[in-house]
Image: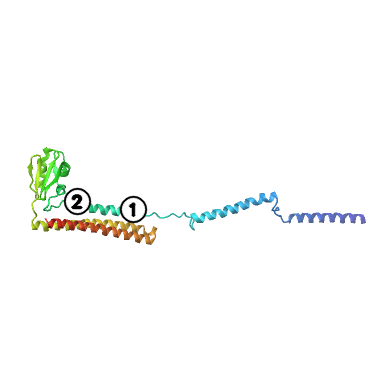
Amino acid sequence: MALLLRRGAALAARSFRAAAAASSASTAVHRLPAAGSLAGVAELAPARLFLFDSRRGFAKGKKSKDDRGDTVQAAPDIGPTVKSAATAQMDAAVIALSRELSKLRTGRATPGMLDHIMVETADLKVALNRIAVVSVLDAHTLSVMPYDPSSVKSIEHAIISSPLGINPTPDGNRIIAAIPPLTKENIQALCKVVTKSAEDFKQSIRRARQKALDTIKKSASSMPKDDAKRLEKEIEELTKKFIKSADDMCKAKEKEISGS
């Protein structure tokens, strides 16, 4: 009986030690490999690379994207385009005014005063200066030399039919056009035409100005406020420049008419 009790106690002791060992293994803390070992390098390297790539990506993002992750792009500079368009339109108005004023007759002979006269040929109507050479013989006389002598009659008829009040005379293969002096009534009427023409073409200059300012206003939200103000000021200066050019041109024409 004593022998059986001792064997039972021994078996119980071995079972207890085995259970304790199993419990200890299941709750043991897993230690990281030593930093100097190859296993440690193999396991730590991916984690370090991940952290490095994350930091690098974050730094790039700060330079190329805003807080919402959208790419930031600089607004285009509309200044050169706006100024170029306004200058072209204003210059075209001044050129058209010059062409219009050249059609007005004064007491002094000028080759350009016949440029606007249209001559009816066999095929179509063409400008006189396209089919003849106009030159000044003296202060009150023009010479018209057609390229084709057969067009002398057509040119003569066109000059007579124009509102210039000129009565040309044929002289062989050319036409002599004497410019009659202007009366006081003619001078006053012509000066009124000059004033009206000036105002009409200055309105064209102002329309070009307004168009440029409207373009600047539409783009104001995408450009610095100081840049918009500077551009508006430059457009105003352009407008004053071309308005003055038109005024000077008309004053010179009025002086030419009145002094004839």
Q: Please indicate whether residue 206 sits to the left or right of residue 9 in the image.
A: left
The residue at which mark 1 appears reads as 81
Q: Secondary structure at mark 1?
A: helix
Please provide percent x and percent y for residue 203: 23, 57
Q: How is the image coloured?
A: rainbow
Query: In what quadrant of the picture does the C terminus appear?
Result: bottom left
Closer-to-camera residue (182/79):
182
* Residue 146 occupies quadrant: top left
Count all numbered tags in the image, as a single digit.
Answer: 2
N-terminal-most mark, 1 or 2: 1
Q: Residue at x 26, y 59 (%)?
A: 240
Amino acid type indicated by mark 1: Thr
Query: In what quadrant of the picture does the N terminus appear?
Result: bottom right
* Residue 206 occupies quadrant: bottom left
Q: Please indicate whether residue 34 sits to the left or right of residue 80 in the image.
A: right
Q: Is residue 25 visible?
A: yes
Q: Is residue 1 visible?
A: no
Between marks 1 and 2, how big is the CA–CA gap? Answer: 27 Å
Q: Residue at x 9, y 58 (%)?
A: 185
Closer-to-camera residue (220/201):
201
Please provide percent x and percent y for residue 239: 27, 58
Q: Nearer the viewer, mark 1 or mark 2?
A: 2
Q: Residue at x 32, y 54 (%)?
A: 82
- How many residues crowd around disc 1 within 10 Å: few (fewer than 14), some, or many (20 or more)? few
Please provide percent x and percent y for residue 31: 71, 55
Q: Secondary structure at mark 2?
A: helix
Amino acid type indicated by mark 2: Arg
Please provide percent x and percent y for residue 23: 76, 56
Give the label on residue 252, or none: none
Give the label on residue 99, or none: 2
